[in-house]
Image (cartoon, rainbow, N blue to C red):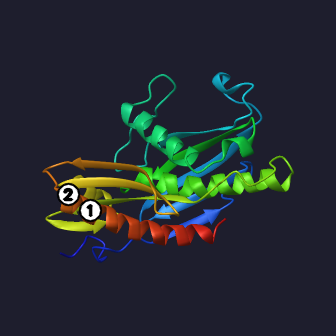
Amino acid sequence: MVRIDQRSLTELRSVRLTVDFVDYAEGSILIEAGKTRVLCTASVEEKVPPFLEGKGLGWVTAEYSMLPRATHTRNSREREGRVSGRTQEIQRLIGRSLRAVVDRQALGPRTITLDCDVIQADGGTRTASITGAYVALHRACSQLVKRGLCPAHPVKTAVAAISVGIVGGEIMLDLCYQEDSRADVDFNVVMTAEHEFIEVQGTGEGGTFNRASMDALTTLAEQGIDQLLEIQKRSI
């Protein structure tokens, strides 16, 4: 099968990371994966949510949004109290993925918020957000260490995410929107540098999948994540 952008079935889209994309955030990066572009910023605040007060632990959380013209037609801007279920699910996924790789005791009683704003969407916005937000988080934590605010670097290991799917009977890596929209099976996989899973979201969109297909999909995702981890290293 010839893919829309002429890639092989097991090939990532071109990935570009631009660090310090904005001036004021403690960590920021623009991640471009094919035509998908996400601005990820890390903001450090010297406070924690009420449920963590007095415990000496830090907190890492995330917010996700799409600009109105991130897609082919304008979508209404989401506002506080009117956030869609999809947006809530994605930002919780990003937050879980990043908390999994942070030593919250080493972080200390402060909060790091990762804002992931989709400038342009062409599939894989949640996985690009996780991959980019990790770099922003790491760079922000490096600043805390440099300023003597953390005794050790709070980030324990790297994390990246990628989509895989079955389209027209073929297993593919890193689906663009046109592929994702007609996928029979769609997986989003989040994994650490130690090849440990943080989350696997697998759905039979237009069909079912068996154990062999699931193993093949996660194996391909692992290969793609290894490539992303190498790209991340050059930006932290």
Quarter in which the C terminus is drawn: bottom right
Looking at the image, residue 44 sits to the left or right of residue 116; the answer is right
- Towards the viewer: 71 or 232: 232
Label for residue 170? none
Looking at the image, residue 77 sits to the left or right of residue 144; the answer is left
Q: Calculate the distance from the C-alpha at mark 1 to the C-alpha at mark 2.
A: 6 Å
Residue lying at 69% horizontally and 43% vertically, measured from the top left: 43
Q: Quadrant of residue 185?
A: bottom left
Looking at the image, residue 229 sits to the left or right of residue 148; the answer is left
> Please, which residue is most extreme toward the right here?
148
The percent coordinates of residue 18 (x first, y second) are: 61, 65
Q: Is residue 53 above or below residue 149?
A: above
The percent coordinates of residue 173 (x first, y second) are: 32, 67
Residue lying at 66% horizontally and 54% vertically, measured from the top left: 155
Residue lying at 83% horizontally and 46% vertically, measured from the top left: 149
Q: Is residue 107 above or below residue 141?
A: above
Which residue lies under the disc numbered 1? 215
Neighbours of disc 2 within 10 Å: few (<14), some (14-19), many (20+): few
- Three-letter code for the amino acid on which mark 2 is drawn: Arg
Quarter in which the N terminus is drawn: bottom left
- Three-letter code for the amino acid on which mark 1 is drawn: Asp
Callouts 1 and 2 close, C-beta under 8 Å: yes
Residue lying at 14% horizontally and 49% vertically, measured from the top left: 206
Which residue lies under the disc numbered 2? 211
The percent coordinates of residue 201 (x first, y second) are: 33, 48
Asked whether the viewer can see residue 22, the reply is no
